[in-house]
Image (tube, rainbow, N blue to C red):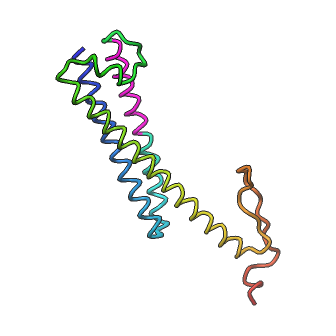
Amino acid sequence: MIESLQNLIESLREELQQYGEMLARLDQQQDLVTRRVPDDLLQSTAEVESQSRIIQNARQLRLQCQREVARALQLPADAPFTEITPLLPENYRPLMAALVQENNELLARVQQRSRQNHVLLSRSLELMSGLIRSLIPGGSPVYTGAGTLRAVVMPQRAIYAEIG
């Protein structure tokens, strides 16, 4: 039981660290969007996606460790921490409660920053789409309301012919 509990504690620490990494990457991405650095933004987006996969792996490991501790305590495998923590040896309870709380708080911050970045990136795409539509007369939006790609109508003459 103690070994399973120590594995769970270590997996919670790892998950916490990965949420911190994600928050740092999202902060960097937000900075790039507000400074309008498109070249670095593509790399930043790839790093956010990569970190998301790392978080998923860390979460899966933590869930596996959580199931093992729950079974050792003769609880259902999907028992939440609210059921697990009170049954732990007393000297482990404060640490477990603190790690779970920190993970939840950091996850909430990651979700909030993700939503903020989504709004910023969506607005940037809207502005770019407007710019493209202004450069291509008769063009239509890139996406339909259903989210499907719509063909862009290209002018018959070159843009420079439109100017002169």
In the image, is residue 119 above or below residue 109?
below
- The answer to whether residue 59 is magenta is yes
The residue sitting at 74% across, 87% down in the picture is 163
> Residue 146, image x and y in percent?
74, 49
Number of marks drawn: 0
Q: In the displayed structure, does residue 132 sit left or right of residue 94?
A: right
Q: Residue furthest top?
A: 74
The residue sitting at 44% across, 43% down in the picture is 52
> Residue 125, image x and y in percent?
60, 63
Predominant SS of the magenta segment: helix
- The answer to whether residue 117 is magenta is no
In the image, is residue 90 above or below residue 50?
above
Front-lying residue, 38 or 78: 78
> Residue 138, image x and y in percent?
80, 71
Q: Quadrant of the C terminus?
A: bottom right
- Quarter holding residue 85: top left
The residue sitting at 70% across, 50% down in the picture is 147
Q: Which residue lies furthest to the bottom in this view?
A: 164
Q: In which quarter of the image is the N terminus?
A: top left
Front-lying residue, 141 or 120: 120
User: What segment is highlighted magenta in the picture?
Assistant: 54-71
Q: In the displayed structure, does residue 154 sit left or right of residue 102?
A: right
- Quarter holding residue 79: top left
The residue sitting at 35% across, 42% down in the picture is 105
Q: Which residue lies furthest to the left in this view?
A: 91
- Quarter holding residue 30: bottom left
